[in-house]
Amino acid sequence: MVGGSLLQLPTDIFETGDKKGTIIDSGTTLTYLPEAAYKAVWDKVFHSHSDLSFQTVQEFSCFQYTGKTCRNLDSSKSVINNPFSIDEGFPEVIFKFEDSLTLHVYPHDYLFENEKDYCFGFQNGGLQSKEGRDMFLLGDLVLSNKLVVYDLENQVIGWTDYNYH
């Protein structure tokens, strides 16, 4: 789900089995999505930003973003909103799992700063090796503001938002 809208994805993308499924790995920095999911997320995230110009920086798709602008009532100059405007300008991404478990990923999590640019932290898993191309690999990018609990005995994982802003 991106910005409150469900994505139309092929149902077989969520099958589990050999070289399919979801891995949650805080030891992996980025997040890799199967190609169909990556393209759908990309399209929805950037749908209202057709004015952005992308460049590749170290294999990441990056763009300059100065935030939303507003008119200062005391002058005719435009001013930039607060530094968290990246969260105001881009949608939240929500991953839904079994038993109503959800993982909320905020724009400041999936869009990371690289000098003067913001870069898209989700990666196209379809460009990876055959072993990982059809898997959802959710790395530290989506877990960075979460308190994660691993129950190895029962093979269960859970999380909650932690230290947001």
Image (cartoon, rainbow, N blue to C red):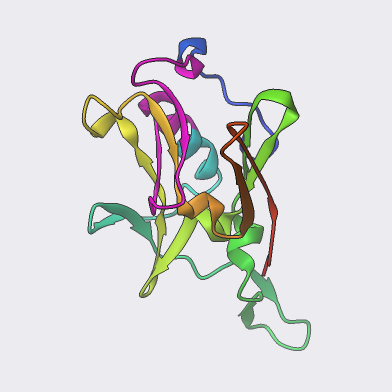
Q: Is residue 60 above or below residue 136?
A: below
Task: Using the rendered view, name the quadrant where residue 161 is placed.
Answer: bottom right
Q: Which residue is most to the bottom?
A: 74
Residue 51, x across and y down, in percent: 45, 53
In which quadrant of the rendered image does the C terminus lie?
bottom right
Task: Using the rendered view, name the quadrant where residue 85 is placed.
Answer: bottom right
Residue 125, x across and y down, in percent: 33, 33
In which quadrant of the rendered image does the N terminus lie?
top right
Residue drawn at 61 percent across, 51 percent down: 148
Residue drawn at 63 percent across, 60 percent down: 87
Q: Is residue 123 above or below residue 62?
A: above
Residue 121, x across and y down, in percent: 41, 52
Q: Is residue 69 above or below residue 139?
A: below
Residue drawn at 68 percent across, 67 percent down: 163
Span shown in magenta: 13-40
Evaluate whether residue 105 shows in this view: no
Evaluate whether residue 131 shows in this view: yes
Relative placement, left or right, of 83 versus 42 is right
Q: How many marks?
A: 0
Residue drawn at 70 percent across, 36 percent down: 4
Decide whether residue 32 is among the magenta residues: yes
Decide whether residue 159 is among the magenta residues: no
